[in-house]
C-alpha cells in the first residue's frame, strides 16, 4: 500500500496490537513486517522513521529496534509500577542500542 507514496512519507506507524485498549500483548508477526518495511525503505534509498505502537516492553524492545523500529510507544510498560525506574530501564536499553 505504500508503493504510491514513498516519495511523500517521513514515517510509517505499525500497530503491533489490535487498536482499542492498553496492556495488550505484542503481535509477533509485526517483527517480520518491520524487517520487510526497513528493507524496502533501504532499497528505495529512503530514510524514514518506523514507529511501533502497542505491546512494547522491556522484554521485547531490543528485538523491535533490531528489526527496524526507531520510534516506540510504550504506555503500560512505562506507567505500570515505578514509572521513573521503568523510564530509566528503557533509556538504558536505547543507549546500549546506539552503541551497537
Image (cartoon, rainbow, N blue to C red):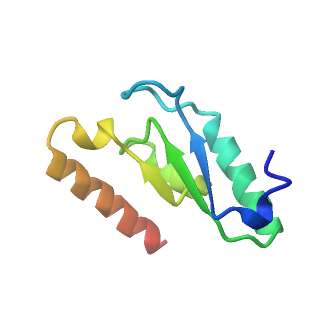
| 63 in relation to 44, above or below | above
Residue sitting farthest toward the right: 4
| 55 in relation to 44, above or below | above
Q: How many marks can you see?
A: 0
* Residue 72 pos. (x, y %): 45, 52
Quadrant in which residue 5 is drawn: bottom right
- Classify the position of the N terminus by image quarter: top right
Q: Nearer the viewer, residue 63 or 45?
A: 45
- At 85% from the left and 53% from the top, the residue drawn is 3
Instruction: Say left or right for 89 vs 34.
Output: left
Q: Nearer the viewer, residue 89 or 18?
A: 18
* Residue 67 pos. (x, y %): 61, 53
Instruction: Say left or right for 30 vs 44.
Output: left
| 46 in relation to 67, above or below | below
* Residue 98 pos. (x, y %): 45, 72
Instruction: Say left or right for 84 vs 96.
Output: left
Quadrant in which residue 32 is drawn: top right
- At 54% from the left and 26% from the top, the residue drawn is 18
| 82 in relation to 68, above or below | above
Quadrant in which residue 57 is drawn: top left
- At 78% from the left and 73% from the top, the residue drawn is 45
* Residue 56 pos. (x, y %): 43, 41
Amino acid at each position: 500500500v505504500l508503493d504510491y507514496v514513498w516519495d511523500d512519507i517521513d514515517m510509517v506507524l505499525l500497530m503491533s496490537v489490535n487498536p482499542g485498549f492498553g496492556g495488550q500483548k505484542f503481535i509477533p508477526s509485526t517483527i517480520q513486517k518491520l524487517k520487510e518495511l526497513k528493507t524496502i525503505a533501504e532499497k528505495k534509498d529512503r530514510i524514514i522513521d518506523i514507529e511501533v505502537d502497542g505491546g512494547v516492553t522491556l522484554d521485547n524492545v531490543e528485538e523491535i529496534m533490531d528489526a527496524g523500529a526507531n520510534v516506540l510507544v510504550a504506555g503500560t510498560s512505562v506507567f505500570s509500577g515505578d514509572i521513573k525506574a521503568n523510564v530509566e530501564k528503557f533509556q538504558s536499553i536505547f543507549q546500549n542500542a546506539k552503541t551497537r
